[in-house]
């Protein structure tokens, strides 16, 4: 009974907030149940089908995972947001470490992104330095986006960046 109450409450709350209101950048292909496996199976069909979508999301834990990883129609995810925050807070040290291909910020970034090997990440970021940080005027968001694209593009690094 408590689980059903939670699902109904979640549906009511979800109906009052859009993806833009919550800061999630999903594809919009989900209904009031939100993103997750349920959104992939049932889409944004209106009505009671959203209860099934919410139940599917809750049963498999796919909504929480999707929000964290940026999968299942859940947008950029926490890894991307944490990377942006990390770049903003550590911009100078990160740029210095990237230019050398090693350092504490590379190690921290490797851990945050779930990559296999800090040394390989350092080498890849060093070789892509001018692409990731094209100028001193580049914003933290631009740097983070290019950094994430670089980590994602090189599958040998084994990063979990969505």
Image (tube, helix red, strand yellow):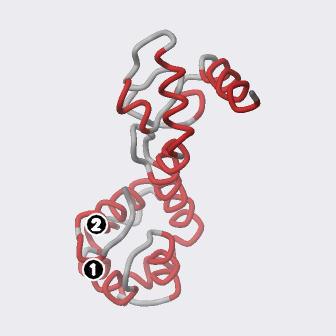
- Residue visible at 48% across and 74% down? 109
Say which quadrant the N terminus sits in: top right
Q: Quadrant of residue 17?
A: top right
Q: Single out the residue that lies furthest toward the right.
A: 2
- Residue visible at 40% across and 37% down? 73
- Residue visible at 35% across and 30% down? 41
Residue 70 is situated, as x and y percent measured from the top left of the image, at 43, 48
Would you name the residue on which mark 1 appears?
124
Q: Single out the residue that lies furthest toward the front.
A: 1
- Residue visible at 71% across and 29% down? 6
For marks 1 and 2, give the CA distance. Answer: 8 Å
Q: How many marks?
A: 2
Disc number for residue 42:
none
Marks 2 and 1: in contact by CB < 8 Å?
yes
Q: Secondary structure at mark 1?
A: helix
Would you name the residue on which mark 2 appears?
150
Residue 133 is situated, as x and y percent measured from the top left of the image, at 34, 67
Answer with mark 1 or mark 2, whichever residue precedes in sequence: 1
Q: Secondary structure at mark 2?
A: helix
Q: Is residue 102 left or right of residue 50?
A: left
Residue 32, above or below 118 = above
Residue 9, above or below 160 = above
Say which quadrant the C terminus sits in: bottom left
Q: Nearer the viewer, residue 135 or 129?
A: 129
Residue 23 is situated, as x and y percent measured from the top left of the image, at 56, 36
């Amino acid at each position: 009974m408590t689980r059903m109450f939670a699902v109904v409450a979640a549906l009511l709350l979800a109906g009052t907030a859009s993806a833009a209101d919550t800061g999630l950048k999903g594809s919009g292909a989900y209904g009031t149940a939100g993103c997750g496996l349920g959104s992939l199976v049932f889409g944004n069909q209106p009505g009671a089908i959203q209860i099934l979508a919410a139940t599917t999301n809750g049963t498999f834990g796919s909504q929480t995972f999707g929000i964290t990883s940026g999968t299942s129609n859940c947008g950029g995810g926490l890894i991307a947001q944490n990377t942006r925050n990390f770049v903003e807070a550590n911009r100078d040290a990160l740029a210095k470490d990237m230019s050398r291909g090693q350092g504490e910020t590379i190690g921290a970034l490797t851990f945050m992104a779930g990559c296999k090997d800090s040394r390989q990440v350092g080498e890849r970021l060093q070789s892509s330095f001018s692409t990731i940080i094209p100028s001193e005027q580049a914003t933290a968001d631009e740097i983070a986006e290019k950094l994430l694209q670089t980590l994602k593009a090189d599958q040998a690094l084994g990063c979990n960046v969505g």
